[in-house]
Image: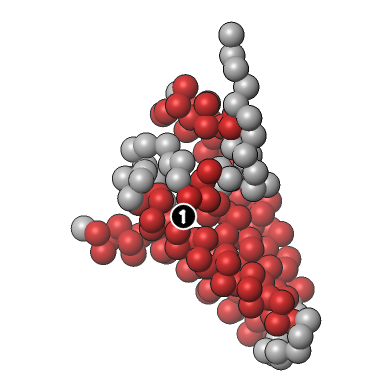
Amino acid sequence: MLYLRAAAAMTFPVTVDVLVPAWLLRASDAQLDLDPLRALGVPLIVAGAALLIDSVFLRFAREGKGTLVPIDPPRFVVRGGAYQLVRNPMYVANVTLLVGVAILFASWLVLGWAVVMLVVFHLFTIAYEEPALRRKFGDDYEAYRRSVSRWIPCRRRSRRVP
């Protein structure tokens, strides 16, 4: 069952971060050239991949007791690791990784894909995900939402409600 959950959890990130960028790079004949400026994409790729692995497998699966798949959602609000700094580290990881690939290959198409995904993630988050989390977790999610930023990594002070 664990392997099935892991495979299901990786389907979306592999499609967004590997398959589509590979197709875009191939379609544009982009070349890998490690000049110093383009090499700046490498740390972004590494950071994005590490954050993605941490947020999906170590936090979402272990702490939340669920997966990315809607039929196996988390049972608890995830608050550990990067979730202490930003409510959507998986999406931040995906965009960071894509921007790193765009820089490394000097690909405007991959950068455009990163922007498209950022918009899709934002719209999905505000239109579906946050309302669903409010319904499922109630006050626990509201307290978390008040204390942690949606996109920019930082901690906010909890506002006291009378």
Residue, x 42% and y 28% (percent of image)? Answer: 137
Q: Position of residue 132 (x, y in %)?
A: 48, 32
Number of callouts: 1
Q: Position of residue 89 (x, y in %)?
A: 55, 52
User: Taking 95 as reference, is 129 left or right?
Assistant: left
Disc 1 marks a residue whose amino acid type is Ser
Residue that carries the numbered disc 1 in the rendered image = 55
- The answer to whether any part of residue 157 appears in the image is yes
User: Taking 110 as reference, is 20 left or right?
Assistant: left
**Callout 1 secondary element:** helix
Query: Which quadrant of the structure image shows residue 91?
Result: bottom right
User: Taking 118 as reference, is 131 left or right?
Assistant: left
Residue, x 53% and y 54% (percent of image)? Answer: 90
- The answer to whether any part of residue 122 appears in the image is no
**Is the residue marked by circle 1 packed among few (<14), some (14-19), or many (20+) residues within 10 Å?**
many
Question: Can you say whether 74 is above or below 30 in the image?
Answer: above
Compare residues 31 and 40 and report the one nearer the observer: 40
Residue, x 52% and y 26% (percent of image)? Answer: 143
Query: Which quadrant of the structure image shows residue 161?
Result: top right
Q: Position of residue 118 (x, y in %)?
A: 66, 54
Compare residues 73 and 62 and report the one nearer the observer: 62
Q: Residue furthest top?
A: 162
Q: Quadrant of the C terminus?
A: top right
